[in-house]
Each structure stands twice: as C-alpha cells, then as structure tokens.
Image (tube, rainbow, N blue to C red):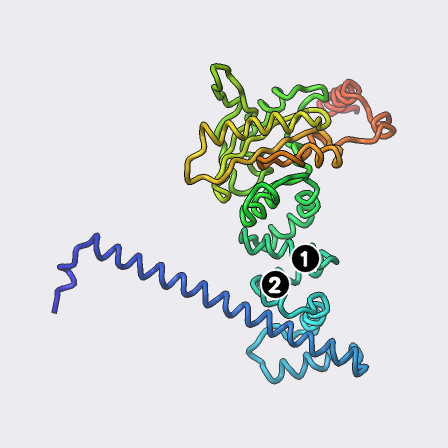
C-alpha cells in the first residue's frame, strides 16, 4: 500500500481541486433539477385547480380546503399554504402552454416566478425578464430592480441593425445589451455642455458609467486615437464586451440624431475591425448616444449600413416641465435661505 505521505503535494492538491469542482457542479445540477421538478409540480397543481374551477364550477374556497388537506398529508413539505396555491393557479393561468414552462420559467426559482406574476401583466415581458434572469443569474432583488427601472422598455426602444448584420446568437446578445435611454443622472453638469465635457465627466465617474452600461463592459479608453492614412481620428469611448467578445465604440452626441452620424460610426467600426480586432474577436459594434432621436429617421439611416450599429438616447438629468421650473426657487434664493437657517441655528432667538 502506498503511503499517503509519499504523494506529491502539488499533484494531490490538483486532484482534490478537480474532485471539489465535480462535486460542486453535481450539487448545482441537482439543485437545478429539483427546482425544475418543483416548478413543474406547482404548474400542474395550478392547472388542475384552474381546470376544475372553470369547467366544474368549483369556487375559491376549494383552495383553503385543499391547502389544509395537502399540509396534513405532506407535513414535511413546504409550499402548500393557501397563498401559494393561489400563486400556483395564477402561474398556470399565466402560462397555459406547458412547452413555455418547460423551456423557460421552470429554469427559474419559484420565488422569481412569483415576483414576475406580481410585477407584470404581459406574458411577453415576463418571459423576457425570465430569460434575462436565467442568462445573467439575477437574484430576486436584482430582478425587481430591473423591472422597476423598466429595462425591457429601455432595451426594446433602441434602433439597431443587429439582426441583419450579426449572427443570430450574437445579435440577440447585442440587442439585450443596449438600453434606451441611458440614465446619466449621477452626473452634475450644466445644460449647455459639449460632447467632450460629457465624455470627460463619464470617464471621471467610470464606475457609475459601467454600472449603467450593464454587465460585461471593460473600459479601454476615451478619446481613443486611431491613425488612418496618416490622419488622426479619435473615438469618444472604446470598450470591450467580455460576453460578446467584441469591441464596442460609443459616440456621444448632445443633440438630436442626424443621419450622417451613422456614416461616421460605420467608418469607426470598420477601422476598429481592421486595426484592433483580434481574429478570434466577434465583429465590432457601434453605439450612437444622442439627446433624442426620430425613430423613422434612425431606421432609414441604418437601412443600408452593413456594420452592426445601435442608436440610443441618454438622459443627463431628469427634465422638469417649464411650469414647474418656474415655480422652483433659483440657486441664489436657496443659498440665501440656507444662510439664514444656518445663522438661526448658530444664534437662536431667545
């Protein structure tokens, strides 16, 4: 018998790490399998309740009775409360097609599905958020944050030509990364700022900017220089997306979208593909960020462009209606009031 002490330490550590990885993977896969079966069971129970209520006239009180009987029969199982049985019924009603349950929502924890039922009425939106949660591993809280921030609406408002210029899998991922609008409310800037001012401000707050862009963006540089034919050209912002495995060029505009912007971005994307892109990288993507856009104009501008480009908008600060602006005090008035309050705190009246 070989003495355990004679085994090389490095070799044993490698062997142990391999086993730990296998065990952890098996545990995750087992948990996923258990979750799938549980969600499918809940859907089947909900379908049976729904069927009997709609075809046989069973009232809502059957749920209370069923909950008591099931908990008595299966005391060790959680999830048979009246409230949860109501969710099972709602779940079956929301997804009448078992194939959709099997392919999508059964891959989410039950708690995520409950949140989707509570927060959204549209099956299309629920399925979109479910797919994103699966793809990005969102927690329940993160799922709710994205729903509250209307991520679905933002990402489906951008105008792109990704479907025509990228392979299907890459196109879907690229479409999911772009939002409309991007919120730059973390910046404090004057109304008449220029593109260069916005670029500098975003770089100064790069951590906040990366959070707003979403998962997977790695910052490469700002005012990034490219030499082409002896002339210098500068990209506003250059990123690399780790999941898409491609460069992302962002061009900042402080006004409305203009058709000529797409030609300039097409030029930038072609240059990055030739000068920076590695053979294993996917095609470079361009994103034009404007203050606003006319959707019809944007669609025409991208119609015959063969490079993948998206057109979206940014919001530097939340705009207030003019009547409300007129009712608000000026900065000078606020400062004067603050000085008065400070004096009263320091020297209170007797």
Residue 211 in percent (x, y) is at 57, 38
Residue 130 in percent (x, y) is at 62, 57
Is residue 149 shown to the viewer in this render? no
| Residue 260 image-quadrant placement | top right
Left or right, 282 with respect to 2, comes to right
Q: Which mark is residue 95?
A: none
Residue 35 in percent (x, y) is at 54, 68
The residue singled out by tag 2 in the image is 105
Marks 1 & 2, CB-CB < 8 Å contact = yes
| Residue 236 image-quadrant placement | top right
At x 58%, y 27%, the residue is 202
| Quadrant showing the N terminus | bottom left
Picture layout, residue 3 above or below residue 274: below
At x 75%, y 58%, the residue is 121
At x 64%, y 21%, the residue is 195
Picture layout, residue 249 above or below residue 13: above
Q: CA distance from mark 1 to mark 2?
A: 9 Å
**Mark 1 or mark 2, earlier in chain:** 2
The residue singled out by tag 1 in the image is 126
| Residue 77 image-quadrant placement | bottom right
| Quadrant showing the C terminus | top right
Q: Residue furthest top?
A: 230
């Amino acid at each position: 018998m070989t003495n355990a002490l004679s085994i090389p330490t490095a070799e044993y550590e490698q062997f142990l790490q391999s086993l730990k990885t296998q065990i952890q993977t098996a545990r995750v896969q087992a948990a996923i399998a258990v979750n799938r079966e549980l969600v499918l069971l809940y859907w089947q129970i909900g379908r049976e309740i729904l069927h009997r209520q709609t075809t046989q006239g069973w009232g809502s009180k059957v749920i209370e009775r069923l909950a008591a009987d099931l908990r008595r029969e299966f005391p060790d199982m959680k999830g048979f409360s009246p409230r949860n049985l109501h969710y099972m019924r709602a779940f079956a009603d929301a997804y009448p097609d078992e194939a959709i349950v099997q392919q999508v929502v059964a891959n989410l924890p039950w708690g995520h599905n409950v949140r989707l039922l509570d927060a959204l009425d549209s099956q299309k939106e629920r399925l979109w958020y479910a797919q994103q949660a699966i793809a990005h591993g969102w927690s329940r809280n993160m799922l709710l944050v994205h729903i509250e921030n209307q991520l679905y609406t933002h990402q489906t408002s951008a105008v792109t030509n990704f479907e025509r210029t990228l392979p299907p899998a890459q196109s879907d991922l690229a479409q999911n990364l772009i939002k409309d609008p991007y919120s730059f409310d973390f910046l404090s800037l004057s109304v008449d700022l220029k593109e260069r001012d916005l670029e500098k401000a975003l770089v100064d707050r790069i951590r906040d900017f990366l959070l707003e862009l979403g998962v997977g963006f790695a910052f490469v540089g700002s005012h990034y220089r490219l030499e082409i034919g002896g002339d210098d050209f500068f990209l506003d912002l250059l990123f690399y997306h780790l999941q898409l495995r491609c460069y992302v060029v962002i061009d900042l505009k402080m006004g409305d979208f203009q058709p000529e912007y797409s030609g300039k971005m097409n030029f930038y994307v072609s240059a990055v593909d030739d000068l920076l892109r590695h053979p294993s990288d996917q095609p470079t993507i361009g994103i034009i960020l404007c203050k606003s856009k006319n959707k019809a104009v944007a669609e025409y501008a991208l119609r015959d462009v063969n490079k993948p480009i998206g057109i979206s908008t940014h919001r530097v600060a939340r705009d207030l209606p003019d009547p409300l602006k007129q009712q608000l005090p000026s900065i000078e008035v606020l400062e004067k009031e603050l000085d008065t309050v400070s004096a009263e705190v320091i020297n209170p009246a007797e």
